[in-house]
Image (spheres, rainbow, N blue to C red):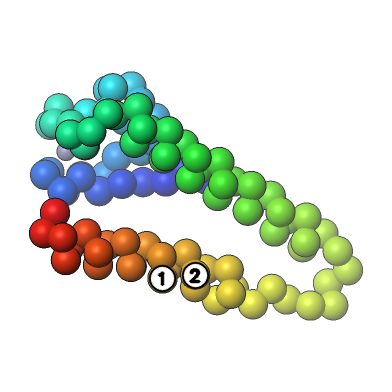
């Protein structure tokens, strides 16, 4: 899974490898994504991508069984969508 971020400062899209290549800085404007230790951000992003890829693989295995069922997409996507919305809302509330 390739996770894409949108940088608040410039509004442009950035992929995780680009953040790695630029040591935690935006490839477009050179500003750091975090004031904290950049490696922690990169590690968290990589962990998210790995987890996403694992989920994709697991779902593919499920789909390999006799198709007498369909996975209810909202039960997979819903919690992730809710989590992302919640995190975004929490960040806005914190004034970040
Ligand atoms: Zn930027």
Instruction: Depth check: give the residue in front, 68 or 42.
Output: 42
Q: Position of residue 49 (x, y in %)?
A: 50, 43
Identify which residue is drawn at 34% across, 36% down: 41
Identify which residue is drawn at 58% across, 68% down: 76
**Other-residue count near label 2 (Cα within 10 Å), few / some / many at <14 / 14–19 / ≥20:** few
Alpha-carbon span between mark 1 and mark 2? 5 Å
Tag shown at residue 63:
none
Tag shown at residue 82:
1
60 relative to 1 in the view: left or right:
right
Task: Give the answer, above or below, for where 34 lies relative to 93.
Answer: above
Q: Quadrant of the C terminus?
A: bottom left
Identify which residue is drawn at 85% across, 77% down: 68
Identify which residue is drawn at 31% across, 61% down: 87
**Which element is circle 2 on?**
helix
2 relative to 50 in the view: left or right:
left
Answer yes or no: do the residues labelled 1 and 2 have beta carbons within 8 Å?
yes
Tag shown at residue 79:
2
Q: Position of residue 88 (x, y in %)?
A: 27, 62
Which quadrant would residue 38 be assigned to in this image?
Answer: top left
**Other-residue count near label 1 (Cα within 10 Å), few / some / many at <14 / 14–19 / ≥20:** few
User: In this orientation, does residue 28 appear?
Assistant: no
Task: Give the answer, above or below, for where 7 lies relative to 62.
Answer: above
């Amino acid at each position: 899974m390739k996770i894409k971020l949108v940088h608040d400062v410039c509004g442009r899209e950035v992929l995780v490898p680009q953040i790695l290549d630029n040591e935690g800085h935006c490839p477009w404007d050179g500003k750091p994504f975090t004031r904290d230790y950049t490696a922690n951000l990169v590690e968290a992003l990589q962990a998210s991508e790995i987890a996403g890829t694992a989920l994709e693989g697991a779902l593919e295995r499920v789909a390999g069984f006799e198709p007498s069922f369909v996975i209810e997409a909202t039960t997979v996507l819903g919690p992730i969508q809710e989590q992302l919305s919640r995190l975004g809302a929490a960040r806005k509330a914190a004034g970040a």
